[in-house]
Image (cartoon, rainbow, N blue to C red):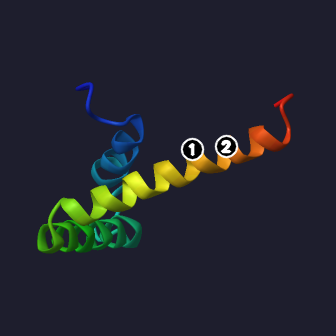
Amino acid sequence: MPPDRHPLDRVYELRLFLGGADPADPVVDTAGKVQNALANWLTAIGPLPPLVVLVALLAGGALLVRHRRGRNPKA
C-alpha cells in the first residue's frame, strides 16, 4: 500500500470489488461535494483571507493562554 493511502481506503475498495456494493456511496459522495466546495471557495478568495484568519486564531489562543497563566501562575 502506498504511504499516502489510509488503511480504511482499502475497506471501501474491497467492499466494491468483493461485496458487489454500489459505488454510489452517500458518505463518499458527500465528502467529495464538501471537498469540491471548499476547494472552489478557497480558489475564489485566494490564500490571504484564510491566512489572516489562521494568524488571528493563533494570536487569540496565545493571548488566552498568556491571560490564564497570568491569573494562575501554577499552570
Residue found at x 29% / y 35%:
5
- Residue ID for mark 2: 65
Badge 2: how crowded within 10 Å, few (<14), some, or many (20+)? few
Image spot of residue 53 (x, y percent): 37, 61
Residue 52 vs 45, above or below: the answer is above
Q: Quadrant of residue 25?
A: bottom left
- Quarter of the rendering containing residue 6: top left
- Type of the residue with mark 1: Ala
Q: Is residue 9 above or below residue 41?
A: above
Q: Is residue 37 left or right of residue 6?
A: left
Q: Which residue is most to the front?
A: 70
- Which residue is nearer to you in this view: 40 or 1? 40
Q: Residue at x 29, y 71 (%)?
A: 24
Crowd tier of the residue under label 1, counting other residues whose Cα lies within 10 Å: few below 14, some 14–19, many 20 or above? few
Disc 2 residue type (three-letter):
Val
User: In the drawing, what numbered circle is on residue 10?
Assistant: none
Residue drawn at x 86%, y 28% is 74
In depth, the one of 25 and 50 nearer the eye is: 50
**Residue that label 1 marks:** 62
Q: Are marks 2 and 1 in contact (CB under 8 Å)?
A: yes
